[in-house]
Image: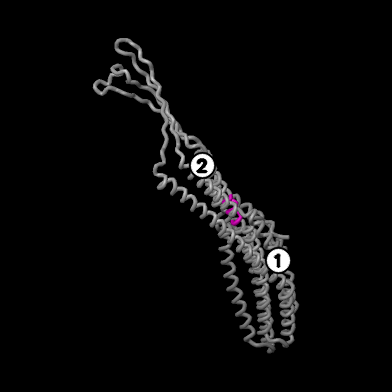
Amino acid sequence: MLNIILTILLLLICGQATSSTQGLLTLQNATELAVQNNPNLAQMRARAEAMVAISPQVSSLPDPTISFNARNLPTNSFNLTQEDMTMIGPGISQSIPFPGKLSLRGAAEDFEAEAALQNITEARLWLLSQVKQAWWQLYYLGHALQIVNNNQELIRQLIQVARTKYEVGKGLQQDILLAQLELSNLLDQQLILNNTRHKSVAQLNALLGRIANQTINLPPQVDLQLSTLLPENILFQLADNDRALLASKRELINASQVRLDLAKKDFYPDVTLGAFYGFRHDRPAGDSRADLLTLNMSMQIPIFAARKQAKAVDQRNSELMQQKYALADEWNNVRAQISQYAGDFQLAKEQVMLFNTGIIPQARQTVASMLAGYQVSQVDFLNLIRSQVALFNHELQYWNALVEAKQASAKLQAAVGKDEIYE
C-alpha cells in the first residue's frame, strides 16, 4: 500500500497527465478569433468608416440653387407683353464660404476620424488583453481541477491505509473520519471549480463571438516562461509613442484647435453670388425687347459678433482646454496602470519562483516523510493530513501566481500599447 501511495505522490510531483489534442484552442487562435468575430470591434470599425466619409462632405461647396422666376408681372392682367420690365427665366445662386473655412471644416472631421481609428486600436488591445486573461484563467482552472482530482485519489488511498491500520488495531477510527472529511472538502472544491470553469468558458466564448456553451479545450503544453520586464521609464516612453488612447486624445486636441480656428473665421462673412436671365416678350406693336441679365452678390454682416461669434470662440477655447486636460488625465492614468501591472507581474513572478524552487519541493518532501512515518506509527494521522492539505494549497497557489503573472502581462501590454515589453 505504501508503494502505491508513493507512486501517486510521484505522479503529483512530475505532473503527468494525458489530454486530448483534438480541437485545441491555443492562445494565438483565441486572439485571432476575437479580432475576427468580436461584434464590438465590428461596430467601432463601421463607425470609423462613417466618420471618414464626413470630411469630403463638409469641405465641399454648398450645392448651388437653381430657380425659375417670373418678375414684374402686372397684377391687373398678368399679361407678359403689357409691361417692358416683365420677364421670366432661370436663375442660379452659389454660396461661397470665406476662404479657409471649408478646409478647416474638413480638417476637423479628419482629426475626428483619425481619433475614431485610434479608438479601434485601443479597443482591440483591451479585447486581446481580456481574451488572454480569460484564456489563462481557464488554464489555471484546468490545472486546479487536475490537482483536486489527484488529491482526491491520494486521500482515498490514505483512507484505505487508515482503515487497514484500524482493522488490525494499530489505528484510530477518527483517522478514517478525518480523511473522509477532507475528501468531502475536495469534492466541494471540485464542484466550485467546475462551476467557475463553466462561467469562464461562457465568458471567453462571448469574447470570441461564439455561442456561450461551445466546448473549449486548451493545449496541455504552453509557454510558461516569465521574462524580465523593461524598466518602467522605458515602458512609459513606449506608451507615450504607441498607446492608441493617447494618440486618440491628441487627435481630438487637433480637432478642437481647428474648430477654434474655424470659429475665429466666422467673424468674416460668407458670400452668395447669383445670376438671373430674364426673357422678355416683344411689344404688342411688334417691337422687340432685349433680354435682361441680373447679377447679385450678398453677404452676412456679423453685427451680433459680441453675442454670437465671440461666444463661439470662447466655447471652442474651453473645448480645447477640456481636451488638453483630458489628455493629461489619461496620461497620468496610463502611467499608473503601467506601474500597477508591472508591480503585479513582478510580485507574481517572484511568488512563482518561490513556490517552484522552495515551498512546493519542501512541502512534497514533508508529505513523503510524514507518510513514511505514519506507516510505522511515528507520525499521527492529523499531521499527515495537514501536510497533504498544505501541499495541495501550495500547488494551487503556484498555478494561481503563474496565471496572475500572465494576466498582469496581458494587462501591461494593453497599457503600453504593444506586446514588446520584455528585455
Which residue is painted at 66% across and 84% down in the image? 382
* x, y percent for residue 271: 45, 34
Count the marks.
2
Q: Residues within 10 Å of mark 2 (few under 14, many from 20)?
A: many
Query: Foreground: 234 or 378?
Result: 234
Query: Of the numbered discs in the image, which one, if any, rests on residue 105?
Result: 2
Q: Secondary structure at mark 2?
A: helix
Q: Main secondary structure of the magenta part?
A: helix
Q: Amino acid at mark 1?
A: Ala
**97 inside magenta stretch:** no
* x, y percent for residue 14: 74, 70
Nearest to viewer (mark 2 / mark 1)? 2
Q: Is residue 74 above or below residue 200?
A: above
* x, y percent for residue 273: 44, 30
Task: Tell which circle, 2 or 1, labels the residue nearer the N-terminal end.
Answer: 1
Query: Of the numbered discs in the image, which one, if any, rests on residue 17?
Result: 1
Which residue is painted at 51% across and 42% down in the image? 105
Query: Quarter-wise, where is residue 344 in the image?
Result: bottom right
Query: Foreground: 303 or 236?
Result: 303
Rendered-image quadrant of the C terminus: bottom right
Q: Amino acid at mark 2?
A: Arg
Residue 361 falls left or right of residue 271: right
Which stretch is magenta? 118-126
Residue pushed farthest top? 286
